[in-house]
């Protein structure tokens, strides 16, 4: 994938000598590749769906959320009860 992006960038730069808009296209291509293409750490883009890394990330998020919810209930018992009562309506 990286080879295709680099080759495309080189072609766009060469075309850019005649029309500078192609240079902007080359920069945009590199920006998109750097942000989304190289196994970035953004959720959902780093690993293939269903892989072990994705499941581990899901479990970490789930466990962290459960930890925060337990802490919230422990530190604010009245608000937690009110929220549970409102959910049941």
Image (cartoon, rainbow, N blue to C red):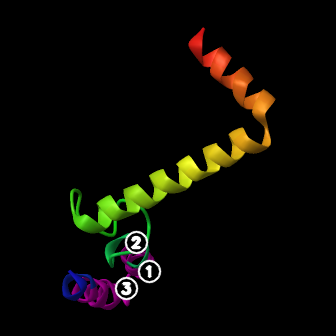
As measured in the structure, the alpha-carbon distance from the residue carrying label 2 to the one carrying label 3 is 19 Å
Q: Quadrant of residue 20?
A: bottom left
Q: Nearer the viewer, mark 1 or mark 2?
A: 2
Question: Residue pushed farthest top?
Answer: 89
Q: Secondary structure at mark 1?
A: helix
Residue 5 percent coordinates (x, y): 26, 82
Q: Is residue 76 left or right of residue 18?
A: right
Looking at the picture, tell me which residue is in the foreground, 76 or 24. Answer: 76
**Numbered circle sitting on residue 36:** none
Q: Which residues are magenta?
A: 6-33
Residue behind mark 3? 16
Decide: is 5 above or below 68: below
Label 1 packing within 10 angstroms: few (<14), some (14-19), many (20+): some
Residue behind mark 2? 32
Q: Quadrant of residue 23?
A: bottom left
Residue 64 percent coordinates (x, y): 54, 56
Residue 73 percent coordinates (x, y): 70, 39
Picture residue at 71% right of the left edge, 30% below the top: 80
Decide: is 28 above or below 75: below
Q: Quadrant of residue 10?
A: bottom left
Q: Secondary structure at mark 2?
A: helix
Picture residue at 30% right of the left edge, 68% below the top: 53
Q: Determine the main secondary structure of the stretch shown in magenta.
A: helix
Q: Nearer the viewer, mark 2 or mark 3?
A: 2
As measured in the structure, the alpha-carbon distance from the residue carrying label 1 to the one carrying label 3 is 11 Å
Q: Is residue 33 left or right of residue 82?
A: left
**Numbered circle sitting on residue 27:** 1
Looking at the picture, tell me which residue is in the foreground, 9 or 37. Answer: 37
């Amino acid at each position: 994938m990286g080879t295709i992006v680099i080759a495309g960038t080189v072609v766009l730069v060469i075309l850019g000598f005649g029309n500078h808009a192609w240079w902007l296209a080359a920069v945009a291509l590199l920006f998109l590749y750097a942000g989304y293409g190289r196994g970035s750490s953004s959720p959902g883009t780093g690993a293939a769906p269903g892989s072990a890394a994705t499941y581990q990330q899901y479990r970490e998020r789930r466990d962290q959320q459960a930890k925060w919810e337990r802490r919230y209930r422990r530190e604010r018992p009245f608000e937690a009860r009110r929220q549970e009562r409102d959910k049941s309506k």
